Image (cartoon, coloured by chain):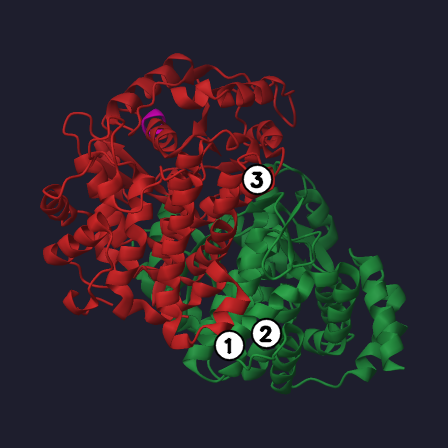
């Protein structure tokens, strides 16, 4: 069932929408974390952070907040994130269990949050059946955890502005292995502006590109609802400000807002073909997410237009709100945004990426949205020729 | 976009909307382990046959998942007054305990939802003294499951973390605010609102529009509530006249239900301001229904704040009137165009309801034709409003004289004299 909006865009009004996380955003947002730990009866959290400037900065902020509480204390563990494997995960799990930890605080962006979710899966599986044979690898762990009534530890995600919203979803991917469970969604999300990293515009631009693709794919008529559409509209407007002012605090705040909108959408949608492909290529080392989005976004827009008619016409009202010239249509505005972000993303050009992807279609076809992914690749390959 | 330095956002756990959404209620309840709910409703809803509809859906449910038994409604509590009060909550909580219920299904408008939230607090936490949990953030525990099925499109209570319950003995309305009060699920089914009479549809619809707009101008606004406000304004502006012209237009009823739900989520997270400040008190002093107060006061509240909110309310012209009119209107004229558009919508509702829907306080009459509000009520309402906490979220710093001016304008139906409005510095 659909309702026609002023913009001509069809919006499904039969829908289900879940808001699973409470969000604390802005200056000193992290100061609310100790009280929230008490609220969910988590006196002894396990903290996981990345061993880099950003991770250590967040860890320092957290320690300062925790000092003022009567909580029992916490175990902190930093990871590199790129070298650790399943063995390290199980070591972490052992420490979690032996320290009688009661929840997880994850400080950082996407891959760190993925580690936290895998740790949650491992630790909660062990607590549920301490005598069971431990899983042998990531995929066995994912299978073991995916029963409907599995109970996870509460997860507190402390994020930066380098986000695309997947951090708030009930999924995580490590080494090509996917963990998915509705209850893996963080129970609390913190976005403290003191935690915004400085000077990594490349990273911000790459995340913006991915978020752009994700917002656009979220409005495919079969998936959307008035709630998703409203967050997409607001998310794209914030992303515009974020991309236009990438080097200023205002721009970082706008990017963080875009991430907030994305995090409301993420738990309610399935990934689209472009975002699936970008994530898959990145984890397989075929191309970076930014390169894939840059190479395929115009074709993805074309596909949505040809398949779903007026699905993207709601975009036309957004340049008006931004005060852009009256004749700016939504698609050209999006394409301009994409170009601006790509200019900062330190990534390679388009044709080689498409050809490389086309050569690897059999590997990529195992994706969840295989048919849509292949259609997108086929369209792009024709264009590239 | 005005970005706050800090904000906190909590929303409804699950929103199930659509034609036939009600049929999904048993499955949702089963997933949360509920099998013996107390059904809270009021007599009006019962007489409209809506309680029966919900009972039949729940009665037809079969065991699912890890559930041993199908859902059995343990008791129906329909003794809910027009304004939720502590005695009603105590009676409902006693029934909950006696019948060994494990959850609550609330079927009704704002008063039913608030009563259900009160019963939920007392039944989970024990004791009968609801006042122990009054105020903001004092409630810190997860409560028994609450499933909300709204039968009006106005209060948005199915999406809010707020309950307003009158102390039966003192007559004071006490508010309770906590994310733990948000229902576990909200079911928006157009079948539940198609029987709502035109006057009540108009009044509750304007209540929803007021929630959305006040949340958008409030000092506590945030990016997520802004998003919900804009979508709610667009849906309400387009569908409210339509559901009065054709009450059985289920598509428009559903869109109104979604508008009200989003407006509830918006104001629940960013609060309301002068329109509610004065509306609460006009309701308390004169007994004017809340939705009628909101519809009358909305344009005057915006006019009062105009010098503080020009850039914000300019943006509302797009969802209210569409892209063409937004672009045709000079940016400097957009704020006034928004106010004119809201007055135009109210005027349209006035005509569509055969002039039953009033445009000014002077026109609110009892069934015998006598006036519900007299000019001498204005200072009484204004003094009472000084103690209403919602004023603290108003962009302009409100004082007694300002409140009198706004009430007088809304009473006689003339535009507020901008030259007399105090220009303060709250924002």
Residue at x 29%, y 22% (from the top left corner): B88
Q: Magenta segment, principal secondary structure?
A: helix
Residue A141 coordinates in the image, percent (x, y): 69, 49
> Which quarter shows the N terminus of chain A?
top right
Task: Give the colour chain A carries in the figure.
Answer: green
Residue at x 53%, y 74% (from the top left corner): A320
Residue tagged 2: A208
Q: In the image, which lettered chain appears red?
A: B
Residue tagged 1: A242
Viewer-side residue, B188 vs B248: B248
For residue A341, above or below residue A273: below
Answer whether residue B140 is visible to the viewer in this image. Answer: yes
Of the two numbered discs 1 and 3 in the rendering, the one whose residue sits closer to the viewer: 3
Residue at x 44%, y 28% (from the top left corner): B106
Residue A97 coordinates in the image, percent (x, y): 52, 47
The subunit carrying tag 2 is A
Answer whether residue A102 is visible to the viewer in this image. Answer: no
Residue tagged 3: B16
Residue at x 47%, y 67% (from the top left corner): A257
For the magenta stretch, what is the residue range?
B121-125
Viewer-side residue, A101 vs B173: B173
């Amino acid at each position: 069932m659909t309702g026609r909006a002023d913009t001509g865009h069809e919006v499904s009004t039969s829908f289900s929408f879940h808001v699973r996380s409470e969000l604390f955003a802005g200056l000193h947002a992290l100061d609310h974390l100790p009280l929230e730990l008490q609220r969910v009866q988590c006196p002894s959290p396990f903290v996981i952070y990345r061993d880099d400037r950003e991770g250590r900065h967040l860890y320092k902020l957290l320690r300062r907040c925790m000092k003022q509480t009567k909580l029992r204390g916490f175990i902190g563990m930093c990871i590199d994130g790129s070298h650790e494997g399943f063995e390290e995960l199980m070591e972490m799990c052992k420490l979690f269990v032996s320290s009688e930890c009661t929840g997880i605080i994850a400080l950082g962006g996407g891959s760190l949050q993925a580690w936290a979710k895998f740790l949650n899966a491992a630790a909660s599986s062990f607590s549920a059946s301490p005598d069971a044979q431990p899983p042998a690898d990531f995929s066995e762990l994912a299978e073991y955890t995916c029963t409907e009534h599995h109970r996870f530890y509460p997860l507190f995600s402390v994020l930066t502005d380098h986000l695309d919203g997947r951090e708030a979803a009930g999924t995580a991917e490590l080494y090509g292995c996917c963990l998915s469970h509705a209850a893996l969604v963080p129970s609390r999300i913190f976005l403290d502006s003191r935690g915004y990293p400085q000077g990594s515009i490349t990273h911000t631009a790459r995340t913006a590109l991915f978020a752009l693709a994700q917002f656009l794919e979220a409005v495919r008529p079969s998936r959307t609802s008035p709630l998703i559409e409203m967050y997409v509209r607001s998310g794209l407007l914030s992303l515009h400000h974020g991309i236009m002012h990438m080097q200023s605090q205002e721009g970082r705040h706008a990017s963080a807002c875009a991430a907030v909108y994305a995090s409301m959408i993420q738990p309610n949608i399935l990934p689209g073909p472009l975002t699936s492909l970008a994530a898959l290529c990145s984890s397989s080392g075929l191309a970076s997410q930014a390169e894939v989005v840059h190479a395929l976004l115009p074709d993805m827009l074309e596909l949505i237009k040809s398949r779903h008619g007026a699905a993207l016409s709601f975009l036309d009202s957004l340049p008006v709100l931004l005060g852009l010239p009256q004749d700016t249509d939504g698609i050209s505005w999006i394409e301009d945004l994409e170009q601006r972000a790509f200019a900062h993303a330190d990534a390679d050009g388009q044709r080689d990426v498409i050809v490389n992807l086309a050569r690897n279609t059999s590997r990529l076809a195992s994706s969840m949205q295989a048919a849509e992914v292949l259609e997108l690749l086929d369209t792009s390959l024709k264009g590239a020729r | 976009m005005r970005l706050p330095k800090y904000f906190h956002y909590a929303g409804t756990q699950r929103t199930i909307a659509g034609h036939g959404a009600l049929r999904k209620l048993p499955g949702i309840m089963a997933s949360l382990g509920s099998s013996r709910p107390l059904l809270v409703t009021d007599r009006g809803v019962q007489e409209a046959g809506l309680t029966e509809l919900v009972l039949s859906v729940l009665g037809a449910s079969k065991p699912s998942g890890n559930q041993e038994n199908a859902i059995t409604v343990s008791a129906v509590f329909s003794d809910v007054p027009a304004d939720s009060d502590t005695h009603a909550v105590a009676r409902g909580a006693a029934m909950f305990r006696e019948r060994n219920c494990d959850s609550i299904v609330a079927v009704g408008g704002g008063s039913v939802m608030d009563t259900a939230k009160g019963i939920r607090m007392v039944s989970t936490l024990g004791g009968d003294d609801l006042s122990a949990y009054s105020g903001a953030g004092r409630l810190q525990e997860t409560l028994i499951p609450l499933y909300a099925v709204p039968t009006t499109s106005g209060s948005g209570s199915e999406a809010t973390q707020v309950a307003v319950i009158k102390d039966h003995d003192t007559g004071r309305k006490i508010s309770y605010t906590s994310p733990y009060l948000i229902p576990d699920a909200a079911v928006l089914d157009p079948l539940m609102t198609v029987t709502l009479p035109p006057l009540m549809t108009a009044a509750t619809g304007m209540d929803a529009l007021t929630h959305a707009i006040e949340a958008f101008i409030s000092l506590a606004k945030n990016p997520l509530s802004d998003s919900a406000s804009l979508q709610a304004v667009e849906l309400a502006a387009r569908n409210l006249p339509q559901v009065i012209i054709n009450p059985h237009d289920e598509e428009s009823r559903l869109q109104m239900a979604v508008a009200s739900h989003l407006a509830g989520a918006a104001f629940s997270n960013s609060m309301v301001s002068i329109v509610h400040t004065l509306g609460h008190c006009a309701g308390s002093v004169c007994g004017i229904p809340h939705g009628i107060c909101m519809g009358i006061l909305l344009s005057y509240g915006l006019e009062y704040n105009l010098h503080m909110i020009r850039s914000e309310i300019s943006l509302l012209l797009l969802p209210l009137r569409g892209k063409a009119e937004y672009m045709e209107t000079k940016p400097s004229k957009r704020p006034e165009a928004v106010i004119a558009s809201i007055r135009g919508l109210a005027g349209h509702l006035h005509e569509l309801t055969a002039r039953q829907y009033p445009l000014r306080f002077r026109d609110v009459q009892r069934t015998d034709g006598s006036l519900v509000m007299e000019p001498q009520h204005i200072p009484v309402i204004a003094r009472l409003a000084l103690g209403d906490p919602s004023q603290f979220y108003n962009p302009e710093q409100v004082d007694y004289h300002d409140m009198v001016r706004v009430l007088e304008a809304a009473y006689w139906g003339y535009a507020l004299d901008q030259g007399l409005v105090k220009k303060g510095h709250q924002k």
